[in-house]
Amino acid sequence: MNPWDRSILLIEDNPVDVDLTLRAFARRKLRNRIEVARDGEEALEFVRRWEAGRLTSSSEDRDIKRAYELGVNSYIVKPVEFEKFMEVAAQLELYWCVLNRAPHEA
């Protein structure tokens, strides 16, 4: 699977942060489709639809553990500072599009 065929689920309730995230991804020329969930309930709907095919900037161990129990591929906590946020956006592109490997489908 081409890494740019994968969607990214952004879970964010703050419209300003959604806009900043989308701008950061656009600045990095990230070509993946971005799905936006405004809260945990919307996120679970996406998860149900995807895994029926695939959560917040919480760094709480229980949230991270639950996300992996639900089958996420990766859990990244959103930095608060803009410069750090831009660094993370660049690293996400590298991670998902270059370093990450999906299993081969039989």
Image: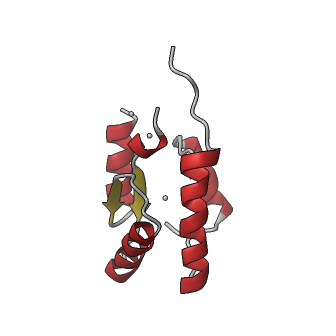
- Determine the residue positioned at 43% across, 72% down: 27
The reply to whether residue 70 is in sight is yes
Furthest toward the right, the residue is: 61
The figure's colour scheme reads secondary structure
Side (left or right) of 79 relative to 28: right
- The one nearer the camera, 47 or 93, is 93
Residue 20 placement (x, y as % from top left): 40, 78
Side (left or right) of 55 relative to 99: left
- Determine the residue positioned at 57% across, 33% down: 102
- The one nearer the camera, 92 or 13, is 92
Residue 42 placement (x, y as % from top left): 32, 57
- Determine the residue positioned at 41% across, 55% down: 9
Q: Is residue 61 above or below residue 79?
A: above
Furthest toward the top, the residue is: 106
Quadrant in which residue 75 is drawn: bottom right
The reply to whether residue 77 is in sight is no
Side (left or right) of 44 relative to 57: left
Residue 79 placement (x, y as % from top left): 59, 77
Q: How many marks?
A: 0
- Determine the residue positioned at 53% across, 68% down: 89
